[in-house]
Structure formats: structure tokens, C-alpha cells
Amino acid sequence: MHALCAVLRSRGRTLGVVTFLRTVGRTAFERFDSPYAEDVAVRMAALLDLADLVEVTGSAGPAGGGDDA
């Protein structure tokens, strides 16, 4: 099994780690896979941060369409 890990960071906070796995029958991760994994981690962290914000405030902001009916 091959693994590639990337840190989930948003607004200066570490939220966790994402691990990408490949089975034994697949090729190992290459150096060029790292920037892709980091890009995915940035996007995941932003979504997790936004979800936390929505949970705390009940709204995603002006365009979030909260309960302002």
C-alpha cells in the first residue's frame, strides 16, 4: 500500500490531515502528485472551515441564504 498525506489548514489553523491511498497493485505516488494532494487539501479545509462557520452562525454570510426570510 502507498500513502500520500497533506495537512488540512485554513485561516492559520490546522484542522487535520487527509491521506490518499493506493493499493499494492498500483504505482507509488510520484513527486508531481504532491501539489495535487495539497490543492485538494486546501479546498477540503476551506469547506470544513465554512461548514464550521455555518454551524456556529447559522449562515454562510450575505450570499449564504440563511434564515433571513
Image (tube, helix red, strand yellow):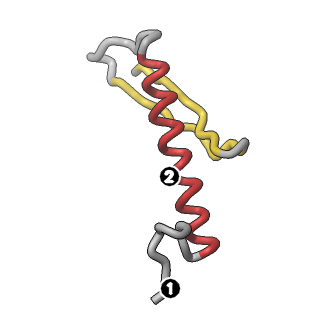
Q: Quadrant of the C terminus?
A: bottom left
Q: Quadrant of the N terminus?
A: top left
Question: Who's the residue at 49% across and 78% down the image?
Answer: 66
Check disc 1 and report the residue beneath it: 68
Mark 2 vs mark 1, CA separation in Å? 22 Å
Vertical placement of residue 49 versus 38, above or below: below
Q: Is residue 37 left or right of residue 25?
A: right
Indicate the position of residue 56 as horizontal and vertical percent values: 63, 72
Q: Please, which residue is most extreme toward the bottom here?
A: 69
Q: Residues within 10 Å of mark 1 (few under 14, many from 20)?
A: few
Helix or strand or loop: what does disc 2 sit on?
A: helix
Indicate the position of residue 58 as horizontal and vertical percent values: 56, 76
Q: Please, which residue is most extreme toward the left here?
A: 25
Question: Who's the residue at 33% across and 23% down the image?
Answer: 23
What's the residue type where badge 1 is placed?
Asp
Question: Who's the residue at 48% across and 41% down the image?
Answer: 43
Question: Who's the residue at 43% across and 24% down the image?
Answer: 36
Helix or strand or loop: what does disc 1 sit on?
A: loop
- Quarter of the view holding residue 53: bottom right
Vertical placement of residue 28 versus 18, above or below: above
Vertical placement of residue 67 versus 45, above or below: below
Q: Please, which residue is most extreme toward the front here?
A: 62
Q: Residues within 10 Å of mark 2 (few under 14, many from 20)?
A: few
Indicate the position of residue 59 as horizontal and vertical percent values: 54, 73
What's the residue type where badge 2 is placed?
Leu
Mark number, residue 47: 2
N-terminal label among 2 and 1: 2
Q: Depth check: 49 or 61 in front?
A: 61
Marks 2 and 1 close (CB-CB < 8 Å): no
